Image: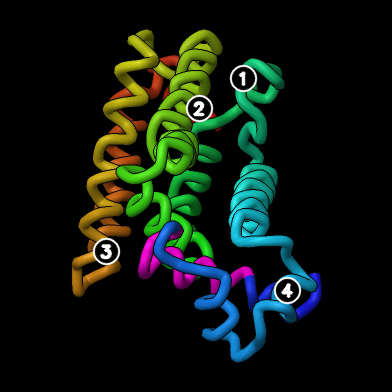
Amino acid sequence: MSDTKENILHTALRLFARDGYEAVSVSAIAGELGMTKGALYKHYKNKRDIFDSIVERIYQMDYERAQEFEVPEEVFEKAPLPYHNTSVDKIDAFIKAQFRFWTEDEFGCHFRKMITLEQYRNPDMAELYQKCLAGGPVDYMEDLFREMIEQGVLSKSNPTQLALEFYAPYYLLLSIYDVSPDKEKATNLLAAHIERFMQKNTAKMSKEKEQSQ
């Protein structure tokens, strides 16, 4: 992707996060970049094209992050096998990386703010918010926990309830992070939560195996 096209994408997302998607025009994006609308249209057909490229980028980044931390990249229905081989340590590292992405990465942070703003104004944005930051991640973790219970990694429990218990503090800490002057505190609280959660729910057989290695 050219530098100009990349600059358009980042500038548009920053404006969408600040003012809301509906409120930002192509003229505003072009003006922020010091270019004409005609010059911008050489790279993107319209505002929706810019938005679709932003969403595509977010999905690609999420896919690459899942690959990096060796957790399932697709939903369970599309690729169930990777869900059978996910360890506690991989989930721990992945969730911490997700939290850093949504709070520290400029692209991820702006995207999160944009869909949080727009979910109350636009049904498509509400669906996107659920997919990226609410129901989607909970469903993903529910599928992981269900398979880990069946594999004997986690103690027998209701995977739906486990997913809710796991993610509720995560979302709370995202909100705390945004307004807290001590950003590291929220990050440390998340790490402590994950550690306690896994200690509480890891199956006895799995713990004994780890200790013997």
Which SS class for mark 2?
helix
Sequence-wise, the earlier of marks 4 and 2 is: 4
The answer to which of 184 and 125 lies nearer the viewer is 125
Q: Is residue 11 above or below residue 24?
A: below
Sequence-wise, the earlier of marks 4 and 3 is: 4
Sequence-wise, the earlier of marks 2 and 3 is: 2
Asked whether 150 falls inside the magenta stretch, the response is no
Q: Which residue is mark 4?
A: 5
Q: Which residue is mark 3?
A: 178
The C terminus, quarter of image: top right
Sequence-wise, the earlier of marks 1 and 3 is: 1
Most common SS among magenta residues: helix
Q: Residue at x 73, y 61 (%)?
A: 45
Q: Is residue 86 above or below residue 205?
A: below
Which SS class for mark 1?
loop
Q: Which residue is mark 2?
A: 140
The answer to which of 166 and 211 lies nearer the viewer is 166
Label 3 Cα neighbours within 10 Å, binned few <14 / some 14-19 / many ≥20: some
Q: Residue at x 27, y 37 (%)?
A: 196
Label 4 Cα neighbours within 10 Å, binned few <14 / some 14-19 / many ≥20: some
- Which mark is on residue 76? 1
Asked whether 20 falls inside the magenta stretch, the response is yes
Asked whether disc 4 touches disc 2, contact meaning CB atoms under 8 Å apart, the reply is: no
Between marks 2 and 3, how big is the CA–CA gap? 24 Å
What segment is highlighted magenta in the picture? Answer: 9-21
Amino acid, disc 1: Phe
Between marks 4 and 1, how big is the CA–CA gap? 34 Å
Amino acid, disc 2: Tyr
Which SS class for mark 3?
helix
Label 2 Cα neighbours within 10 Å, binned few <14 / some 14-19 / many ≥20: some
Q: Is residue 205 above or below residue 4?
A: above
Q: Is residue 173 left or right of residue 49?
A: left
